[in-house]
Structure formats: structure tokens, C-alpha cells
Image (cartoon, rainbow, N blue to C red):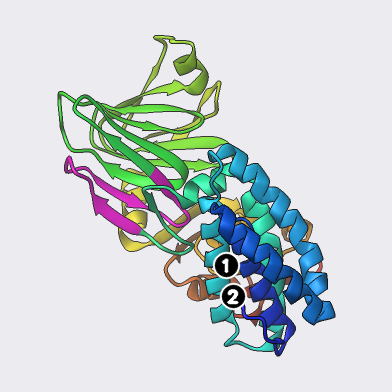
Amino acid sequence: MPTHALPASCDDIAAQAADWIVQLTADDEKTRARACSDFEAWKRQDVRHAQAAAKLQGVLDSLDAISSTSKGHTRPAHTAIRTAISDYKTSRRIKKTTIAIAMVCLCAMPVWMLSHTETAHSLMADMRTATGQRQTQTLSDGTKMTLGSQSAVDISFDAVSRTVNLVTGEILVEVAKDPLRPFVINTREGSIRALGTRFVVERQDEVTTLTMLESAVVVQTAEQKAQGSKSSRVVKAGEQIRITTGTINTVTGIDTREVNDAWQFGQLVVRNRPLTDVLDLLSKHRQGYISYDRDRLAGIMMSVVLPIDDTDKALQLIANSLPDLRIRMLTPYFVYVDRTLPP
């Protein structure tokens, strides 16, 4: 239960408020009833408590929505909140300006996370990675799978099939041979059946991108699969495609060695892409937030190789290559990118 003594600062109140959400929405009815009584007493202790309580209502409403899609359980939401509390307490070691930013994030994140069932699904996935984290695991059949930053997968193996559901993020797969059990990766946009061994699948913004490194796969869109269609497309090594629920689009030929090196050495390889795209990609690997004015940075193109395991160094490399670019680290968790000259 939250501490009922008068907190020393507003940031203590924010942490307590998040903890109250867990108690007030517990699956156990007795726990909820006891929390309601204690919560009323907590609100009366301080006007700031009452103000924080008023802000909780939106979060509680979002939890109701999650509960209805999770068979009455709020485990995904509770996991998100506890993670936020843990991260928040850690952030209190830095200066007050950072604490203020963390408070805003703490208040906003539960509402955003709980209103997206996909995020809740990610929290309960069989394998998942945090921002800036990569994880490699050998599956029970010998398949080797590496998850990139902010990725989540569910795994379902049985006697007749091997299925991986990519919820979000990107994975590098080296499929072990098994003639009796096909290896399939499903996303919301389509289905990918391996004929060979090594490829990358990324899911972001309702688009699945497949990059073939070795051999081939057979691809169907979600619509084709739902309709029981026999239509499909074979994608071979060196090819890259984008899949939506109803279409398969060829992107371009790729340098397979470059992609392999990027995964092996933890690199972000960019060829003639807008700076704004580079910053967006780098944000996926950085704890905190990279802010910029998209219009002000428009038109700046980059070709660069950046280390994703050291985003501070990556930002410095970008600054070194663009003399009129200014990168200011206002706190360890908030970076602002701007131009010193008019665009």
C-alpha cells in the first residue's frame, strides 16, 4: 500500500498516485474495497493528494478498457505502472529539472500505454526487450533469434508447427532445419514461411518489413491468409519488401553484408536518408527523448554509420558531420537538436 505520511515533495505524490492505481484496480475484490477506504483518507491529508486523485480518473477509465479485453484482468496495466514507478524512483537521483520531466512522463505514460492493447500485449510477450537493449536466444528447435530494441515476440512450438508472432520491433532469425515442422513468423500485416535460414523482420507503424539475407521465404498478406487464398510471393536473398494487410511492395535491393554487420556490431547504417529519419531511428535505442523541429531540419540528408549501443557517441558523430547542427543535452534524458543557421 502507498505510504500515508505527508510526502516531502510533489514527486513523492506522483509515485504514490501511480501505486494507488494498482491497488484500486486489483483483481481481488477485498483488496479493492480496502484500498478505496484508505484512498479516501489519503486524499484528505493534503490538497495536493486530492489534485493528484482527480488526475487518476482518466487512468482508471483506461484500465477498465484494458480489463474488458483481458478477461477481467489488469496484469498488463499493472506491469506498466510498476515499471514506471521503478524508473521514476531511479530518476530522482538527478537534478530537479529532470525530475519535472519524469513527472510529466509518469502521468502521461499509464494513460497512453493502457489505451493501446498492443502495448499491453508486448508487456506479456514471451520475449521482449527494453529501449536500447538487444537479446539473443536459441529456441528449443535450435533456431537462433535476436531481438532488437523495443521488441516483443510470442513463441508457439508444437509437434507439427513452429510459429513466432512478432508483436512489435525487429528480429533477426537464423532458422534451424526441421522438414516436419514449418517455421512461420506472423505479424498483424502478414505471414512469412521460411524456406531457408537467415532474415530480418521488422514491424512498425502497421507495416512489416522483410529483409532477406540468405535463401528464401514465402509471404502472404493478412487478407490473403484470412481468405484462404493460395496466392503468395517468394522473396529471395538480397531482396527487401514491405507488407501491409493487403499489399506487398518491393522496396529495393539490399547489401546483405552491410545488414549482417549492422546486427553483429550494433550499428545503424544509413544511406542517403533525411536527418529526421536518422534521429527517429536513433530514438528507438536511447533512454529518454530526442526533440527537434521537423520543418527546421527538413532537407538535410545523411549517409552515416552510427553505434546504437552508445547513442551519446552517435549524436556527437552526427554533430561532427554537420557543422551548423547544434545538439543540446538538457538532461541525460532530454536532447534537443537544432540548427545554428537559418534553414
Q: Residue at label 2?
A: 88
Please state which of residues 228 and 248 is positioned toward the viewer in this rendering: 228
Quick one: SS at disc 2? helix
Q: Residue 84 carries which label?
A: 1
Quadrant housing residue 319: bottom right
Q: Does the magenta stretch include residue 142?
A: yes
Q: What residue type is labelled 1?
A: Ala
Quick one: SS at disc 1? helix
Please state which of residues 22 and 207 is positioned toward the viewer in this rendering: 22
Range shown magenta: 135-153
Disc 2 and disc 1 in contact, CB within 8 angstroms: yes
Quadrant housing residue 175: top left
Q: Quarter of the image containing the C terminus?
A: bottom right
Relative image position of residue 187 (x, y in whole percent): 46, 33
How far apart marks 2 and 1 lie (CA) works out to: 6 Å
Q: Which amino acid does label 2 sit on?
A: Tyr
